Image (spheres, grey):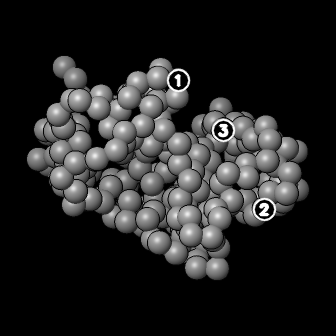
Amino acid sequence: QHPQEMAALDLLIQSLRSFGGDLANCPVWVFCPTAPRPNCRDFAAARVEVCPLDPPAAVLAYPFGGKVAACAAAEARAGREVNALIWMDPECLVIQPPRLFDLEPGVEAALRPVHRRNVGLAAGEPLDPFWQGICAAVSVADFPTTVTSFIDGQVLRTYFNSHAFSINPARGLLSRWYELFQHLITDPRFQAAACADAP
C-alpha cells in the first residue's frame, strides 16, 4: 500500500460512518496483501475488518489485478446471505446515504457508466482487438447497448465504472470476473494484440 492510498481509505471510511445514513454502520472489509500501515490506526475504532489477500504474483503485478482479486474474495466472504455487496475504491467518498447500492429484490447489480471514454469505443466504432478479446472471453459477439460517459458525455458501447458498484454475491459475477481476468493476462496473443504498451 501507498501512504496516499491509505489516507484516502481512511477518509472513505470516515465519510461512510459520518454520512452513510441507514448504511453508515454496515460492515466494512479492507483487503490487503500485507498488514495496513500505521496511519490506519482507526480501523478497529471504525469497525473495519482487515482481510488478508494472497493472489498469485502475476495478478498483483498486473494493473488493477489486486482489485479484481479483492472483489472475488469479498464475494466469497459475503456468501449467499448477503443480497448487496458494495465495492468502493479508496478514492471514493460518501457524501449522502448510498441507497442506490442497496439492491431491491430482483435487482442483481447497480453500476454507472464510466467517467470518461478512456479505452471505451464510440457507439458506431467497430470492435478493436481489446474489446474483441473481452467479447470472446464473455462469449458474446458484441455489446448491443450503449452508455453515456458522465463527465465527457460520449455515447459509448456498454462500458461501466468499477470505482463503486453493487452486486448480488450469489450470482458469482466477481469470481467469474477474476477467472476471466487471470485467463486474459496470461493469454500471450491477447496481451500482444490488445495490451502492449504504446511505442
Residue 26 badge = 2
The quadrant where residue 30 appears: bottom right
Dot 3 corresponds to which residue?
92
C-beta proximity under 8 Å, tags 2 and 1? no
Q: Is residue 148 above or below residue 160?
A: above
Q: Which amino acid does label 3 sit on?
A: Cys
Identify the residue at horizontal 78%, vertical 62% (top origin).
26
Tell me which amino acid carries mark 2.
Answer: Cys
Residue found at x 38% / y 61%: 178
Q: Residue 79 location, x and y as percent?
A: 58, 77
Is 161 on the left or on the right of 13, as rendered? left
**Distance from Cα at disc 3 to Cα at disc 1:** 16 Å
Query: Mark 2 or mark 3, which has the lower sequence index?
Result: 2
Quadrant showing the N terminus: top right
Q: Which residue carries the number 1 mark?
A: 151
Secondary structure state at the residue bearing disc 1: loop
Along the line of sight, which residue is nearer the eye, 86 or 195? Answer: 86
Left or right position of 14 against 182? right
